[in-house]
Image (cartoon, helix red, strand yellow):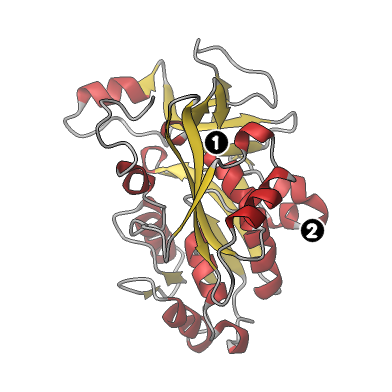
């Protein structure tokens, strides 16, 4: 097993313990370097790896990927943040003969609570590929509205779960514990919906949701749509202050090497794939996006300069 996740992260410590319990040889890297990870897969004949979407993207972009022997890799487990469908399709093509598993969970749930298995990664099931899978044994899932009542299939609300895996509480943080654990259910702070077959579709963190003109926009949905543009290497979507709409949708884009930063072309592409209120009102171009050690984009950092002088981070 290749372990490149931080050991303070549930994916790192959880998979590390799993590997030890099952007798796997553990290849542990102090930090993630795409070329080093690819080299380890080939030289150590790695069978299993957990890779967040940002890591998959970086490995696919690395010039050594095309000449690396990846045939030993049987299972790729991915999660920790939403994955653009185009990135997932490309990864499946490059990592041939590899089973892909998407997992969803939190540190507070001691890891995995839903799994999207290899059978759901067939190109004929692209709608399901956008989901986070179905609840594992022993996990109950609900999606609720602001009134705490269950929402119909397909309607977005807060994801809550009940399982013996749930934490007992935050260490010496009783107020936070009482907000997160209520009536035997753990409130995840994530927005999503369930379909009629029990597949969970995760939209975003509730705190990252953009409210523009009373409409809710989930950045992950916009990011997934924009990612398919041929000039875009990476993208983050944030809400910024707007005098008319309260918040406006802004895309922060990293352009592929050798490509042109053409905001008008990207906006035309977005209009063909998104409802009008979800299309970014503006685009900024940057050389890279700030990320934490587990690969998640630091949207608070991106938003900070736009919200200076405001008492609240909503307008």
Q: Residue at x 40, y 76 (%)?
A: 33
Nearer mark to the viewer, of 1 and 2: 1
Q: Quadrant of residue 173?
A: top left
1 or 2: tag closer to the N-terminus: 2
Residue 123 image label? 2
Is 193 located above or below residue 227 in the figure?
Answer: above
Mark 2 packing: few (<14 Cα in 10 Å), some, or many (20+)? few
CA gap, disc 1 and disc 2: 25 Å
Residue 16 image label? none
Q: Which residue is mark 1?
A: 218
Q: Quadrant of the C terminus?
A: top left
Q: Residue furthest left?
A: 172
Q: Residue at x 72, y 56 (%)?
A: 121
Residue 99 in the image, given as x and y percentages of width and height: 66, 64
Mark 1 packing: few (<14 Cα in 10 Å), some, or many (20+)? many
Residue 252 in the image, given as x and y percentages of width and height: 47, 52
Is 42 located above or below residue 9 in the figure?
Answer: below
Please state which of residues 227 and 53 is positioned toward the viewer in this rendering: 227
**With 170 as the anchor, is 247 left or right in this view?**
right
| Residue 112 shows in the view | no
What SS does tag 1 mark? Answer: loop
**With 32 as the anchor, is 134 left or right in this view?**
right
| Residue 158 shows in the view | yes
Marks counted in the figure total 2
Residue 49 in the image, given as x and y percentages of width and height: 51, 68
Residue 221 in the image, given as x and y percentages of width and height: 60, 42
Q: Residue at x 21, y 23 (%)?
A: 174
Is 118 located above or below residue 114 in the figure?
Answer: below
Please state which of residues 314 and 128 is positioned toward the viewer in this rendering: 314
Tell me if label 1 and label 2 are in contact, CB under 8 Å: no
Is 78 located above or below residue 303 in the figure?
Answer: below
């Amino acid at each position: 097993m290749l372990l490149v996740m931080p050991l303070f992260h549930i994916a790192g410590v959880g998979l590390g313990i799993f590997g030890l319990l099952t007798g796997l040889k553990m290849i542990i890297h102090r930090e993630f370097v795409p070329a080093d990870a690819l080299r380890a897969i080939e030289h150590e004949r790695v069978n299993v790896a957990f890779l967040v979407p940002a890591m998959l993207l970086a490995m696919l972009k690395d010039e050594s990927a095309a000449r690396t022997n990846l045939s030993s890799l049987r299972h790729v487990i991915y999660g920790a943040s939403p994955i653009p469908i185009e990135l997932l399709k490309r990864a499946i093509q490059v990592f041939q003969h590899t089973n892909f598993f998407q997992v969803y969970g939190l540190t507070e749930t001691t890891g995995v609570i839903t799994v999207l298995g290899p059978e759901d990664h067939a190109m004929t099931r692209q709608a399901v590929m956008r989901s986070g899978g179905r609840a594992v044994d022993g996990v109950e899932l609900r999606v609720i509205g602001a009134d705490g009542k269950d929402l119909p299939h397909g309607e977005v609300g807060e994801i809550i779960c009940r399982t013996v895996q749930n934490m007992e509480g935050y260490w010496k943080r009783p107020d936070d514990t009482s907000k997160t654990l209520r009536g035997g259910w753990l409130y995840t702070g994530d927005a999503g919906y369930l379909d009629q077959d029990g597949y969970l579709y995760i939209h975003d963190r509730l705190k990252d949701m953009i409210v523009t003109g009373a409409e809710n926009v989930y950045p992950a949905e916009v990011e997934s749509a924009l990612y398919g543009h041929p000039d875009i290497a990476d993208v983050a979507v944030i809400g910024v202050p707007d005098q008319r709409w309260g918040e406006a949708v802004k895309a922060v884009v990293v352009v592929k090497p050798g490509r042109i930063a053409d905001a008008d072309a990207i906006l035309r592409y977005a209009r063909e794939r998104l409802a009008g209120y979800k299309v970014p009102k503006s685009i900024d171009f940057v050389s890279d996006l700030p990320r934490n050690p587990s690969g998640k984009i630091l949207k608070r950092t991106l938003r900070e300069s736009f919200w200076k002088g405001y008492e609240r981070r909503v307008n």
